[in-house]
Protein backbone atom coordinates (compact mmCIF):
# COMPACT_ATOMS: atom_id res chain seq x y z
CA UNK A 1 0.00 0.00 0.00
CA UNK A 2 1.32 3.45 -0.92
CA UNK A 3 1.48 6.31 1.56
CA UNK A 4 2.34 10.00 1.68
CA UNK A 5 4.95 11.54 3.96
CA UNK A 6 4.08 15.19 4.58
CA UNK A 7 6.13 17.74 6.50
CA UNK A 8 3.88 20.66 7.36
CA UNK A 9 4.67 24.33 7.72
CA UNK A 10 5.26 25.39 4.11
CA UNK A 11 2.90 27.85 2.48
CA UNK A 12 1.18 26.69 -0.70
CA UNK A 13 1.96 29.42 -3.21
CA UNK A 14 2.03 29.42 -6.99
CA UNK A 15 0.01 28.37 -10.01
CA UNK A 16 -1.57 25.06 -11.07
CA UNK A 17 -3.76 23.82 -13.92
CA UNK A 18 -6.71 21.65 -12.92
CA UNK A 19 -7.23 18.11 -14.22
CA UNK A 20 -10.29 16.83 -16.05
CA UNK A 21 -13.26 16.04 -13.84
CA UNK A 22 -13.40 12.55 -12.33
CA UNK A 23 -17.17 12.63 -11.81
CA UNK A 24 -17.70 13.77 -15.40
CA UNK A 25 -15.33 11.43 -17.19
CA UNK A 26 -16.62 8.18 -15.67
CA UNK A 27 -20.16 8.38 -17.14
CA UNK A 28 -18.65 9.64 -20.40
CA UNK A 29 -16.50 6.53 -20.57
CA UNK A 30 -19.63 4.41 -20.09
CA UNK A 31 -21.31 6.43 -22.85
CA UNK A 32 -18.63 5.39 -25.34
CA UNK A 33 -20.43 2.06 -25.83
CA UNK A 34 -23.49 3.83 -27.24
CA UNK A 35 -22.26 4.89 -30.67
CA UNK A 36 -20.67 1.63 -31.93
CA UNK A 37 -17.89 3.84 -33.22
CA UNK A 38 -14.84 5.87 -32.25
CA UNK A 39 -14.76 8.12 -29.18
CA UNK A 40 -11.84 10.49 -28.58
CA UNK A 41 -11.90 12.17 -25.16
CA UNK A 42 -9.30 14.76 -24.13
CA UNK A 43 -8.08 15.83 -20.68
CA UNK A 44 -8.54 12.41 -19.09
CA UNK A 45 -7.09 12.41 -15.55
CA UNK A 46 -4.59 9.74 -14.55
CA UNK A 47 -6.58 8.22 -11.69
CA UNK A 48 -7.33 4.65 -10.71
CA UNK A 49 -11.09 5.00 -11.28
CA UNK A 50 -10.39 5.72 -14.95
CA UNK A 51 -8.10 2.70 -15.14
CA UNK A 52 -10.89 0.48 -13.84
CA UNK A 53 -13.39 1.89 -16.34
CA UNK A 54 -10.93 1.18 -19.16
CA UNK A 55 -10.60 -2.42 -17.97
CA UNK A 56 -14.39 -2.74 -18.01
CA UNK A 57 -14.55 -1.45 -21.58
CA UNK A 58 -11.90 -3.95 -22.64
CA UNK A 59 -13.75 -6.79 -20.90
CA UNK A 60 -16.84 -5.91 -22.96
CA UNK A 61 -14.89 -6.12 -26.22
CA UNK A 62 -14.02 -2.47 -26.83
CA UNK A 63 -10.61 -1.43 -28.12
CA UNK A 64 -9.05 1.21 -25.87
CA UNK A 65 -5.92 3.26 -26.43
CA UNK A 66 -4.51 5.96 -24.20
CA UNK A 67 -2.19 8.69 -25.47
CA UNK A 68 -1.11 10.91 -22.57
CA UNK A 69 -4.32 12.72 -21.49
CA UNK A 70 -6.37 11.47 -24.47
CA UNK A 71 -8.50 8.32 -24.47
CA UNK A 72 -9.50 6.65 -27.73
CA UNK A 73 -12.29 4.08 -27.53
CA UNK A 74 -13.60 1.99 -30.41
CA UNK A 75 -16.82 0.33 -29.27
CA UNK A 76 -17.74 -1.19 -32.65
CA UNK A 77 -16.70 -4.71 -31.63
CA UNK A 78 -18.49 -4.81 -28.28
CA UNK A 79 -19.68 -8.39 -27.80
CA UNK A 80 -19.80 -9.24 -24.09
CA UNK A 81 -22.44 -8.17 -21.57
CA UNK A 82 -20.91 -9.43 -18.29
CA UNK A 83 -18.74 -7.03 -16.30
CA UNK A 84 -16.16 -8.82 -14.12
CA UNK A 85 -17.11 -8.61 -10.46
CA UNK A 86 -13.62 -7.53 -9.38
CA UNK A 87 -13.94 -4.21 -11.22
CA UNK A 88 -17.45 -3.36 -10.06
CA UNK A 89 -16.64 -4.01 -6.42
CA UNK A 90 -13.77 -1.53 -6.59
CA UNK A 91 -15.81 1.40 -7.87
CA UNK A 92 -19.43 2.40 -7.48
CA UNK A 93 -19.47 4.59 -10.60
CA UNK A 94 -19.26 1.46 -12.74
CA UNK A 95 -23.02 1.10 -12.20
CA UNK A 96 -23.60 3.65 -15.00
CA UNK A 97 -22.86 0.83 -17.42
CA UNK A 98 -26.37 -0.46 -16.61
CA UNK A 99 -28.11 2.20 -18.68
CA UNK A 100 -25.44 2.38 -21.38
CA UNK A 101 -25.33 -1.37 -22.01
CA UNK A 102 -29.11 -1.76 -22.01
CA UNK A 103 -29.31 1.01 -24.59
CA UNK A 104 -26.62 -0.51 -26.81
CA UNK A 105 -26.68 -4.26 -26.18
CA UNK A 106 -30.05 -4.93 -24.54
CA UNK A 107 -28.48 -6.96 -21.74
CA UNK A 108 -26.01 -6.63 -18.88
CA UNK A 109 -24.88 -8.71 -15.92
CA UNK A 110 -23.15 -6.86 -13.11
CA UNK A 111 -22.50 -7.33 -9.39
CA UNK A 112 -23.61 -4.82 -6.79
CA UNK A 113 -21.19 -1.87 -6.83
CA UNK A 114 -18.47 -1.10 -4.29
CA UNK A 115 -16.31 1.99 -3.80
CA UNK A 116 -15.76 4.18 -0.75
CA UNK A 117 -17.67 3.09 2.36
CA UNK A 118 -19.27 6.43 3.15
CA UNK A 119 -22.78 5.24 3.88
CA UNK A 120 -25.81 3.71 2.25
CA UNK A 121 -25.98 4.35 -1.50
CA UNK A 122 -28.76 2.08 -2.74
CA UNK A 123 -29.38 1.68 -6.44
CA UNK A 124 -33.12 1.19 -6.04
CA UNK A 125 -33.80 4.42 -7.93
CA UNK A 126 -31.71 3.16 -10.87
CA UNK A 127 -33.43 -0.22 -11.07
CA UNK A 128 -36.95 1.14 -10.60
CA UNK A 129 -36.45 3.63 -13.43
CA UNK A 130 -35.05 1.00 -15.80
CA UNK A 131 -38.01 -1.26 -15.04
CA UNK A 132 -40.34 1.62 -15.95
CA UNK A 133 -38.56 1.81 -19.28
CA UNK A 134 -39.20 -1.86 -19.98
CA UNK A 135 -36.14 -3.63 -18.59
CA UNK A 136 -36.61 -7.05 -16.99
CA UNK A 137 -34.36 -7.21 -13.93
CA UNK A 138 -33.37 -10.26 -11.91
CA UNK A 139 -31.35 -9.97 -8.71
CA UNK A 140 -29.72 -13.03 -7.19
CA UNK A 141 -26.49 -14.16 -5.55
CA UNK A 142 -25.18 -10.58 -5.43
CA UNK A 143 -25.61 -10.01 -9.18
CA UNK A 144 -28.02 -7.96 -11.27
CA UNK A 145 -29.10 -9.21 -14.69
CA UNK A 146 -30.98 -6.68 -16.84
CA UNK A 147 -32.51 -7.49 -20.22
CA UNK A 148 -34.76 -5.75 -22.68
CA UNK A 149 -35.99 -6.14 -26.23
CA UNK A 150 -36.77 -2.46 -26.66
CA UNK A 151 -36.51 0.24 -24.06
CA UNK A 152 -39.36 2.72 -24.28
CA UNK A 153 -39.54 6.32 -23.20
CA UNK A 154 -41.65 7.22 -20.18
CA UNK A 155 -41.97 9.75 -17.38
CA UNK A 156 -39.79 9.05 -14.33
CA UNK A 157 -40.14 10.85 -11.02
CA UNK A 158 -37.05 10.47 -8.83
CA UNK A 159 -37.63 10.44 -5.07
CA UNK A 160 -34.21 12.08 -4.64
CA UNK A 161 -32.12 13.97 -7.22
CA UNK A 162 -29.55 11.18 -7.48
CA UNK A 163 -26.68 11.91 -9.87
CA UNK A 164 -26.08 8.24 -10.64
CA UNK A 165 -29.74 7.46 -11.27
CA UNK A 166 -30.15 10.55 -13.46
CA UNK A 167 -27.13 9.55 -15.54
CA UNK A 168 -28.21 5.91 -15.85
CA UNK A 169 -31.65 6.96 -17.11
CA UNK A 170 -30.11 9.39 -19.60
CA UNK A 171 -27.81 6.67 -20.95
CA UNK A 172 -30.62 4.15 -21.20
CA UNK A 173 -32.94 6.61 -22.92
CA UNK A 174 -30.55 7.71 -25.68
CA UNK A 175 -31.54 4.94 -28.09
CA UNK A 176 -34.95 4.06 -26.63
CA UNK A 177 -38.28 4.46 -28.40
CA UNK A 178 -40.03 7.73 -27.74
CA UNK A 179 -39.31 10.40 -25.16
CA UNK A 180 -38.12 9.95 -21.60
CA UNK A 181 -38.77 12.65 -19.03
CA UNK A 182 -36.80 12.73 -15.77
CA UNK A 183 -38.38 14.83 -13.03
CA UNK A 184 -36.50 15.88 -9.89
CA UNK A 185 -33.32 15.19 -11.86
CA UNK A 186 -29.86 15.91 -10.46
CA UNK A 187 -28.52 19.29 -11.61
CA UNK A 188 -24.79 18.78 -11.12
CA UNK A 189 -22.37 20.11 -13.79
CA UNK A 190 -21.38 16.50 -14.49
CA UNK A 191 -24.97 15.72 -15.52
CA UNK A 192 -24.85 18.68 -17.93
CA UNK A 193 -21.57 17.34 -19.27
CA UNK A 194 -23.09 13.92 -19.98
CA UNK A 195 -25.97 15.59 -21.81
CA UNK A 196 -23.53 17.63 -23.89
CA UNK A 197 -21.52 14.51 -24.73
CA UNK A 198 -24.59 12.56 -25.82
CA UNK A 199 -25.76 15.47 -27.96
CA UNK A 200 -22.32 15.81 -29.54
CA UNK A 201 -22.61 12.22 -30.82
CA UNK A 202 -26.08 12.83 -32.23
CA UNK A 203 -28.36 12.32 -29.23
CA UNK A 204 -31.23 14.58 -28.26
CA UNK A 205 -31.05 15.62 -24.59
CA UNK A 206 -32.73 18.80 -23.40
CA UNK A 207 -32.84 20.41 -19.96
CA UNK A 208 -29.72 18.83 -18.42
CA UNK A 209 -28.82 21.00 -15.45
CA UNK A 210 -32.45 21.66 -14.58
CA UNK A 211 -34.89 19.62 -12.50
CA UNK A 212 -36.59 18.24 -15.63
CA UNK A 213 -34.64 16.51 -18.41
CA UNK A 214 -36.09 15.36 -21.74
CA UNK A 215 -34.40 12.66 -23.80
CA UNK A 216 -35.75 11.91 -27.25
CA UNK A 217 -34.59 8.50 -28.44
CA UNK A 218 -32.58 8.23 -31.67
CA UNK A 219 -31.75 5.25 -33.85
CA UNK A 220 -28.13 6.02 -34.60
CA UNK A 221 -25.18 7.87 -33.08
CA UNK A 222 -21.87 8.88 -34.67
CA UNK A 223 -18.21 9.12 -33.67
CA UNK A 224 -17.12 11.94 -31.40
CA UNK A 225 -14.14 14.00 -30.21
CA UNK A 226 -14.62 15.80 -26.91
CA UNK A 227 -12.78 17.65 -24.10
CA UNK A 228 -14.14 17.22 -20.60
CA UNK A 229 -14.71 19.92 -18.00
CA UNK A 230 -12.21 20.59 -15.18
CA UNK A 231 -12.70 18.99 -11.79
CA UNK A 232 -14.53 21.29 -9.37
CA UNK A 233 -13.67 19.14 -6.33
CA UNK A 234 -9.95 19.15 -7.11
CA UNK A 235 -10.21 22.92 -7.59
CA UNK A 236 -11.85 23.32 -4.20
CA UNK A 237 -9.27 21.05 -2.58
CA UNK A 238 -6.37 23.11 -3.94
CA UNK A 239 -7.99 26.36 -2.86
CA UNK A 240 -8.18 24.98 0.66
CA UNK A 241 -4.55 23.79 0.44
CA UNK A 242 -3.54 27.43 0.04
CA UNK A 243 -5.93 28.68 2.71
CA UNK A 244 -4.97 26.12 5.37
CA UNK A 245 -1.26 26.95 4.96
CA UNK A 246 -1.69 30.73 4.84
CA UNK A 247 -0.70 30.82 1.19
CA UNK A 248 -1.83 32.17 -2.14
CA UNK A 249 -2.70 30.24 -5.30
CA UNK A 250 -3.83 30.79 -8.88
CA UNK A 251 -5.72 27.90 -10.48
CA UNK A 252 -6.24 27.71 -14.23
CA UNK A 253 -8.54 25.54 -16.37
CA UNK A 254 -11.45 25.95 -13.96
CA UNK A 255 -15.13 26.85 -14.22
CA UNK A 256 -15.73 29.28 -11.32
CA UNK A 257 -19.52 28.99 -11.66
CA UNK A 258 -19.26 25.34 -10.58
CA UNK A 259 -17.73 26.41 -7.25
CA UNK A 260 -20.07 29.10 -5.99
CA UNK A 261 -21.08 27.33 -2.77
CA UNK A 262 -17.46 26.50 -1.91
CA UNK A 263 -16.19 29.98 -2.75
CA UNK A 264 -18.94 31.50 -0.61
CA UNK A 265 -17.79 29.54 2.44
CA UNK A 266 -14.13 30.33 1.83
CA UNK A 267 -14.99 34.02 1.66
CA UNK A 268 -16.83 33.59 4.96
CA UNK A 269 -13.54 32.50 6.53
CA UNK A 270 -11.99 35.73 5.29
CA UNK A 271 -10.22 34.44 2.18
CA UNK A 272 -9.95 36.89 -0.72
CA UNK A 273 -11.01 35.24 -3.96
CA UNK A 274 -11.01 36.61 -7.48
CA UNK A 275 -12.01 34.80 -10.64
CA UNK A 276 -12.52 35.25 -14.35
CA UNK A 277 -13.87 32.98 -17.07
CA UNK A 278 -11.43 30.08 -16.57
CA UNK A 279 -9.23 30.88 -13.56
CA UNK A 280 -9.57 31.52 -9.85
CA UNK A 281 -7.17 33.06 -7.33
CA UNK A 282 -7.17 32.83 -3.52
CA UNK A 283 -5.26 34.88 -0.96
CA UNK A 284 -5.36 33.91 2.71
CA UNK A 285 -6.05 36.53 5.40
CA UNK A 286 -3.98 36.85 8.58
CA UNK A 287 -6.77 35.24 10.60
CA UNK A 288 -9.24 32.61 9.39
CA UNK A 289 -12.77 32.92 10.75
CA UNK A 290 -14.97 29.97 11.67
CA UNK A 291 -18.09 29.06 9.69
CA UNK A 292 -21.53 29.43 11.22
CA UNK A 293 -22.71 26.24 9.51
CA UNK A 294 -22.11 24.00 6.52
CA UNK A 295 -24.94 21.78 5.33
CA UNK A 296 -24.21 19.39 2.49
CA UNK A 297 -26.92 19.36 -0.18
CA UNK A 298 -27.41 18.34 -3.82
CA UNK A 299 -26.04 20.85 -6.34
CA UNK A 300 -26.13 23.85 -6.27
CA UNK A 301 -25.83 23.37 -2.50
CA UNK A 302 -22.55 22.70 -0.72
CA UNK A 303 -21.11 19.44 -2.11
CA UNK A 304 -20.68 16.45 0.18
CA UNK A 305 -17.43 15.80 -1.69
CA UNK A 306 -15.99 19.02 -0.18
CA UNK A 307 -17.24 18.56 3.40
CA UNK A 308 -14.13 16.83 4.75
CA UNK A 309 -11.66 19.25 3.11
CA UNK A 310 -13.54 22.24 4.52
CA UNK A 311 -13.54 20.58 7.93
CA UNK A 312 -9.75 20.33 7.78
CA UNK A 313 -9.63 24.10 7.26
CA UNK A 314 -11.99 24.88 10.13
CA UNK A 315 -9.85 22.91 12.59
CA UNK A 316 -7.51 25.93 12.67
CA UNK A 317 -10.10 28.69 12.20
CA UNK A 318 -10.83 31.14 14.99
CA UNK A 319 -14.09 30.02 16.63
CA UNK A 320 -16.53 27.14 16.27
CA UNK A 321 -17.91 25.71 13.02
CA UNK A 322 -20.97 23.49 12.61
CA UNK A 323 -21.21 20.74 9.97
CA UNK A 324 -24.37 18.87 9.00
CA UNK A 325 -23.91 15.97 6.57
CA UNK A 326 -27.22 15.46 4.75
CA UNK A 327 -26.09 13.14 1.92
CA UNK A 328 -24.09 10.23 3.38
CA UNK A 329 -24.43 9.12 7.00
CA UNK A 330 -20.91 7.66 7.25
CA UNK A 331 -18.91 10.51 5.80
CA UNK A 332 -17.12 11.46 9.01
CA UNK A 333 -14.46 8.75 9.02
CA UNK A 334 -11.77 11.44 8.86
CA UNK A 335 -12.86 12.95 12.19
CA UNK A 336 -11.00 10.56 14.49
CA UNK A 337 -7.88 10.96 12.36
CA UNK A 338 -8.08 14.76 12.62
CA UNK A 339 -8.45 14.41 16.38
CA UNK A 340 -5.19 12.40 16.39
CA UNK A 341 -3.59 15.48 14.85
CA UNK A 342 -4.88 17.74 17.63
CA UNK A 343 -8.23 18.87 16.22
CA UNK A 344 -11.11 19.55 18.63
CA UNK A 345 -14.20 17.95 17.10
CA UNK A 346 -17.41 16.73 18.74
CA UNK A 347 -19.39 14.27 16.63
CA UNK A 348 -23.06 13.40 17.07
CA UNK A 349 -24.58 11.39 14.23
CA UNK A 350 -24.71 13.59 11.13
CA UNK A 351 -23.59 16.70 13.06
CA UNK A 352 -19.99 17.70 13.78
CA UNK A 353 -18.92 20.66 15.93
CA UNK A 354 -15.40 21.87 15.17
CA UNK A 355 -13.67 24.17 17.66
CA UNK A 356 -10.63 25.80 16.12
CA UNK A 357 -7.21 25.13 17.68
CA UNK A 358 -4.00 27.13 17.38
CA UNK A 359 -2.18 24.36 15.53
CA UNK A 360 -2.34 20.78 14.35
CA UNK A 361 0.52 18.35 14.92
CA UNK A 362 1.83 15.68 12.59
CA UNK A 363 0.77 12.09 13.27
CA UNK A 364 0.35 8.72 11.61
CA UNK A 365 -3.14 8.70 10.07
CA UNK A 366 -5.10 6.53 7.66
CA UNK A 367 -7.32 7.47 4.73
CA UNK A 368 -10.63 5.59 4.88
CA UNK A 369 -12.11 7.02 1.68
CA UNK A 370 -11.26 9.35 -1.20
CA UNK A 371 -12.31 12.76 0.13
CA UNK A 372 -11.44 11.94 3.74
CA UNK A 373 -7.95 11.13 2.52
CA UNK A 374 -7.72 14.52 0.81
CA UNK A 375 -8.82 16.12 4.10
CA UNK A 376 -5.97 14.45 6.00
CA UNK A 377 -3.46 15.46 3.33
CA UNK A 378 -4.54 19.08 3.75
CA UNK A 379 -4.29 18.80 7.52
CA UNK A 380 -0.79 17.40 7.14
CA UNK A 381 0.26 20.44 5.08
CA UNK A 382 -0.78 22.72 7.93
CA UNK A 383 0.45 20.55 10.82
CA UNK A 384 3.64 21.00 12.81
CA UNK A 385 6.06 18.18 12.07
CA UNK A 386 5.66 15.04 9.97
CA UNK A 387 2.44 13.33 8.99
CA UNK A 388 2.39 9.79 7.62
CA UNK A 389 -0.78 9.26 5.57
CA UNK A 390 -1.51 5.59 4.94
CA UNK A 391 -3.83 4.14 2.25
CA UNK A 392 -2.93 6.73 -0.37
CA UNK A 393 -4.67 4.53 -2.96
CA UNK A 394 -7.99 6.01 -1.84
CA UNK A 395 -6.81 9.50 -2.78
CA UNK A 396 -5.45 8.27 -6.11
CA UNK A 397 -8.98 7.27 -7.12
CA UNK A 398 -9.79 10.92 -7.75
CA UNK A 399 -6.63 13.05 -7.74
CA UNK A 400 -4.14 12.96 -10.60
CA UNK A 401 -0.69 12.88 -8.91
CA UNK A 402 -1.75 15.23 -6.14
CA UNK A 403 1.65 14.90 -4.45
CA UNK A 404 3.35 16.26 -7.57
CA UNK A 405 0.93 19.18 -7.83
CA UNK A 406 1.34 20.09 -4.17
CA UNK A 407 5.13 19.85 -4.47
CA UNK A 408 5.06 22.28 -7.42
CA UNK A 409 3.50 24.97 -5.24
CA UNK A 410 5.72 24.57 -2.19
CA UNK A 411 4.33 21.61 -0.27
CA UNK A 412 6.75 19.16 1.34
CA UNK A 413 5.19 15.83 0.35
CA UNK A 414 6.54 12.57 -1.06
CA UNK A 415 4.85 9.35 -2.06
CA UNK A 416 6.19 6.05 -0.77
CA UNK A 417 5.13 2.85 -2.56
Image: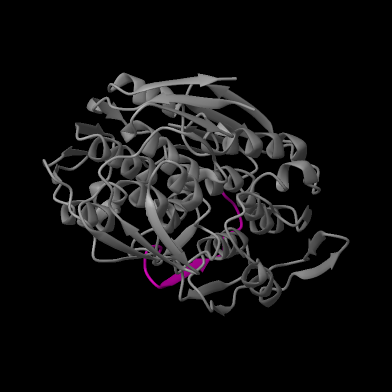
| Magenta part, dominant SS | loop
Query: Is 368 within the magenta?
Result: no
Residue 79 lies, with reference to residue 183, above or below; the image says above
Query: Is 213 within the magenta?
Result: yes
Residue 214 in the figure: left or right of residue 51:
left
Where the N terminus falls, by quadrant? top right
Residue appearing at x 23%, y 40% in the figure = 243
Where the C terminus falls, by quadrant? top right
In the orientation shown, which residue stands out farthest toward the right? 141
Residue appearing at x 54%, y 60% in the figure = 167
| Image location of residue 191, percent across then percent down | 45, 57
| Image location of residue 149, percent across then percent down | 78, 66
The number of callouts visible is: 0
Front residue of 339 and 79:
339
Front residue of 276 and 108:
276
Residue 280 in the figure: left or right of residue 135:
left
Residue 176 lies, with reference to residue 344, above or below; the image says below
Residue 356 lies, with reference to residue 149, above or below; the image says above
Q: What residue span does the magenta drawing correspond to?
A: 208-221
Amino acid sequence: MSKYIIVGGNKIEGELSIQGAKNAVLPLIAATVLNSSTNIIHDIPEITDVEIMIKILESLGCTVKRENKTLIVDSSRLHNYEIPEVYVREMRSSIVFLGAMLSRFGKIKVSYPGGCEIGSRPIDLHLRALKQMGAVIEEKHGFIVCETVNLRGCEIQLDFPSVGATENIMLAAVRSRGTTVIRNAAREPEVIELGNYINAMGGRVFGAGTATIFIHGVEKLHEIEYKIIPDRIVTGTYLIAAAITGGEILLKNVVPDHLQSVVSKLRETGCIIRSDKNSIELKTPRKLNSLESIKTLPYPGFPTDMQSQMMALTTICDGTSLFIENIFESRYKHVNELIRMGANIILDGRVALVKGVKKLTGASVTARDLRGGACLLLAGLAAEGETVLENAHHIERGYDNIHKDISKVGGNIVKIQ
